[in-house]
Image (spheres, rainbow, N blue to C red):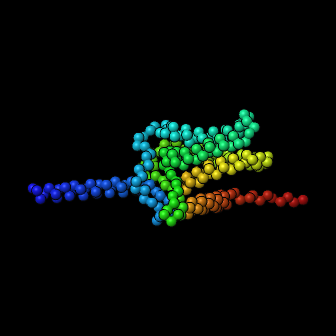
Amino acid sequence: MAHARPEIVRMQFMEIILFEARSLTSQTKSSIMYGEDLDQVPLLDNEEPLDFGEEDLPKGRLKHPVVTTFHLLFRTAALVVYEFCGIFSSSFIGPFIFIVVLLSLDFWTVKNITGRLMVGLRWWNYIDDEGQSHWVFEAKKGGLQGRVTKMEVRIFWVALVAFPVLWSIILLIAVVFSRFQWAIIVVIALTLTGSNLYGYVRCKLGKSDSISQSFKNMAAGLVQRQMVSNVTSMFTRAPPTATPSSTV
């Protein structure tokens, strides 16, 4: 019996190792990672897996109401302050600092928190031992991605796209009316909001070649539909009726 006990302990130890290996494999398969150089992407073994919630909520309910509020709060506040700061102050330095702080808070919140919790996407950057910068774009897939709510996804993408469009219109107005001093703020806003938009589009569509391929497929589909429509109209068009010539 004394010789059999070490064998039992050894078998139990091997079972624990196999269980841990299976759990690590399942966590690795739950996300897609895109990078400029995938061979150089760190394994991030010491990082906990992203938590997207486990419970199912009724349709129309927000799983993360506080996160959704902060997704809209800072960018909306920056836009409101920009539009109405002239009513309360004629200075430029004060509103400039306040708006830039709000835009910075929005950039950090959207990049690190709201995208991860609301849509299951994340993009980030790291520098390797050789000093080279690498960009990584992650997306949850499978069952975990299906646990995000449609309402939060819709709010996330509408806000992510709408605000760069609004800032672009404001930039055009500032240039037309020669408000170049205020255009500096708009350029900063476009840079920060546009960076998040680009990063999450990369996460959603994949690597750059996948994005270009998606646009090519979209364009090819439009051309094919137009050709089919033209051919169909050619065969369904009624032939012109000949009018009898009048003789005098």
Residue 234, horizontal then vertical, whole percent: 67, 60
Give left or right: position of 26 versus 39. left
Give left or right: position of 207 versus 57. right
Q: Nearer the viewer, residue 25 or 99?
A: 99
From this viewpoint, which residue is outermost toward the left?
1
Residue 159, horizontal then vertical, whole percent: 60, 44
Q: Nearer the viewer, residue 170 or 242?
A: 170
Residue at 49% over, 39% down: 64
**Image: 6 above or below 98:** below
Specify the quadrant of the image occupied by residue 224: bottom right
Residue at 67% over, 45% down: 166
Residue at 66% over, 43% down: 97
From this viewpoint, which residue is outermost toward the top?
88
Specify the quadrant of the image occupied by residue 90: top right
**Image: 213 above or below 171:** below
From this viewpoint, which residue is outermost toward the right?
248
| Quadrant, the C terminus | bottom right
Give left or right: position of 127 versus 184. left
Residue at 46% over, 57% down: 32
| Quadrant, the N terminus | bottom left
Residue 63, horizontal then vertical, whole percent: 47, 39
**Image: 164 above or below 76:** below
Total number of numbered discs in the rendering: 0
Whether residue 117 appears in this view of the structure is yes
Whether residue 221 appears in this view of the structure is no
Residue 35, horizontal then vertical, whole percent: 51, 61
Give left or right: position of 101 versus 49. right
